[in-house]
Amino acid sequence: MKTIQIIISPEGKTVLQTHGFQGSECQAASHFLEQALGSTSSETLTSSFYQNASTSQQQNQTHESESG
């Protein structure tokens, strides 16, 4: 199952985590949220990002944004 998790800390830091995406699908799926939340301060890509879309491993990607 493909999901996007949004975590907001008490300090206002926002973290997006995508699960179930392959390759750059995660970036395309979360792009509208990144724009809505503001500038991205960092991005962490896992090994699933670099795998072919035909594999079935889970994709985890974290985008950290400062909101406010």
Image (tube, rainbow, N blue to C red):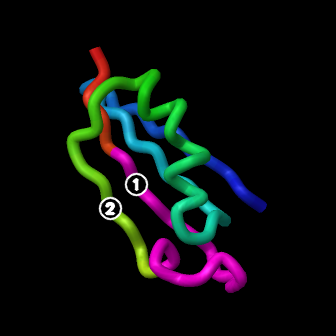
**Residue placed furthest toward the top:** 68
- State yes or no: discs 2 and 1 in contact (Cβ < 8 Å): yes
Q: Foreground residue, 52 or 5?
A: 52
Residue 48 coordinates in the image, percent (x, y): 51, 77
Q: Quadrant of the C terminus?
A: top left
Q: Residue furthest right?
A: 1
Residue 2 lies in quadrant:
bottom right
Residue receiving disc 1: 62
Q: How would you classify the magenta stretch by its main secondary structure?
A: loop
Cα gap from disc 2 to disc 1, whole angstroms: 5 Å
**Mark 1, other Cα within 10 Å: few <14 / some 14–19 / many ≥20:** many
Which structural element holds mark 2? strand
Q: Earlier in the sequence, mark 2 or mark 1?
A: 2
Which residue range is magenta in the image?
48-63
Look at label 2 and name its amino acid: Thr
Identity of the residue drawn at 38% across and 67% down: 45
Report which residue position mark 2 lands on.
44
Residue drawn at x 40%, y 54% is 62
Q: Quadrant of the N terminus?
A: bottom right
Tag shown at residue 8? none
Q: Report the residue at 30% width, 54% height from top.
A: 43
Q: Is residue 47 magenta?
A: no
- Residue 58, given in percent of the width and then of the height, sits at 62, 74
Residue appearing at x 24%, y 49% in the figure: 42
Residue 13 location (% of width, % of height): 29, 32
Give the secondary structure at mark 1: strand
Residue 50 is a magenta residue? yes
Q: Where is residue 21 drawn, in percent x and y?
A: 63, 64
